[in-house]
Image (cartoon, rainbow, N blue to C red):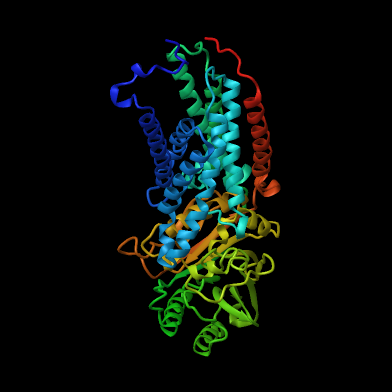
Amino acid sequence: MDPLSTPPLSFFPPSLRDPQRRISLRFGSAIGLCLLSGLLLALCFPPREWSGLAWIALLPAMAASRLLASWRWRLAGGYLLGLLFFGATLWWIGKVTIAGTIALVLYLALYPAFWLVLCGLWTSGHPPFRPKDNLLASAWLASSWVALEWVRGWLGGGFPWNTLGVSQFQALVFAQTARLGGALLLSWLLVFGNGLLFFTGLRFRAEIRGEQKRALHFDLAAGVLLLAGAASYGLFVLISPPTEVAGTLRYALIQPAVPQSVENPFDPQEAIVREITLTESASQAKPQLIVWPESPIGADLLSTPSLRVPLLAWVGSSESWLLLGTPRMQGERLYNEALLFEPKGRSLQTYAKNRLVPFGEFVPFGTRFPILRNLVPFELEFSPGAAPGIFQLQNPPARIAPLICFEDTFSDYARRLARQNPDLLVNITNDGWFTGTPGARQHLANAVFRTIELDLPLLRCGNTGITAFLNQNGAVVASLPEAGRSPEGGEGILFGTAQWHRPRPTLYRAAGDWIAWLSGAVLLFGIASALRRRKTPPQPRTT
């Protein structure tokens, strides 16, 4: 029997001779494979953090794309993949807004759905599977994934949380690749590796079945060399001695662990007393900079007398710089701001958050579709700030780039800040709404890549954690236990001395998301090539 021909019905067992039953089994298998990919992707991120799975997580979905002949079914399979992946990694947002979380997951699932549709253009081929074709198809798969991740990062305000490359935040040898093209370049390498494994498997099967001649697998060898090159580059960066120390800063990061609840808000007066008490204790160590988290108090610290009076009383007697967060009303607009007080309160610098949290601080497309506003528990939305800002310290001289909440997940925004030549990044956040969930750990995972991409250290101060100091290679140098995740977690103070070398030039800092633009061009070329190939009459197959 010709191995490439359709077997006669007698070839199948009686239970599978019904064509409709075979179609159902084929469809069921494909959907199961899509769900398996969604599960494997979810396991790559906190709380499991099995990052090695990212190198094989998309193989089941690629196999499903071969089983699903219609683009509509691929769209459905990819959508289920996305629902499981994003639902399993972002469920914790539902502690604030269940309806908003559902809307967010339903939206984000569209991106894997579109990818699986594109996937079918290159995975549905037949023997022979040539090395050049396998390399090109893998590059097209990787480029389509990265192009979609890039769009997800800016469309509707953007939600770049948990791009595939972020799964490698603990594999610092591979994570250093972000210096060349950001976390998106690491996403590209991961999908490219999945593609090469997939097509290598198809080729091995074809060779075993006698559908094509055995030959050297130059495509697999190229993939191994690429992986070895990425690892070697990362190892070189990690073991290379940095240049001389350019500056130091003694810090005290305050983690007040103020409980957060929409239904039962914590007493603002008690919260400010807790923060000031911890700060007074920290000041005894004479830190040069004290940092509070993004405000865990739902009130303007400067406009509410009961909060302003004790705050300014402490500031007026302080010998340290104080950086904190607070909501602030200016006219009819509400802003999420960072404030930097000079010792003795001699001056005040302010920064308004630019990148807002969808369904947390604003409703994407809410103006066009007012019904979406019913999905969130707040009535007044925050307004974005006008531009990035830099805080300037004196004694010691240091330039600080403030990032509020999930602004540290936006690589392009952090890069804009880096153009103003800061010495270090400081992220203030309040993940206390999600205490006991993997939300704060995922937040840290995303933040790691800003330090690597820009070769800048990062101070992170969270209400309930994760409060930490990260060096310029993305390593966590010091941290406080996260509230709700360990018996000793809760309120505390992280003391330390941040030191930094002069930032080493990185390609990402100079060229930004070049991999996204290149991926877009490769994707368009790949689509045109696939469509042209389908219009070409099939050639006789040879073995």
Q: Is residue 197 above or below residue 295?
A: above
Q: Quadrant of the N terminus?
A: top left
Q: Nearer the viewer, residue 288 or 154?
A: 154
| Residue 191 vs residue 250, the one in the foreground | 191
In the image, is residue 18 above or below residue 421? above
Is residue 235 visible to the viewer in this orientation of the structure? no
- Write the residue at 53% across / 76% down: 379
Relative placement, left or right, of 512 versus 101 is right
Compared to residue 182, the image places residue 284 above or below, namely below
Residue 261 x %, y %? 40, 74
Decide: is 461 above or below 318.
above
Q: On the picture, is 78 further left or further right than 501?
A: left
For image coordinates 49% across by 20% down, the residue present is 203
- Of residue 272 and residue 542, the one placed in the foreground of this image is 542
Residue in the image at 39% along x and 44% along y: 39
Residue 207: % across, % down: 46, 14
Q: Nearer the viewer, residue 49 or 113?
A: 113
The mark total stands at 0
Q: Position of residue 185 (x, y in %)?
A: 59, 41
Q: Judge whether residue 50 can be spotted in this image.
A: yes
Q: Residue 325 appears at what percent x and percent y? A: 54, 73
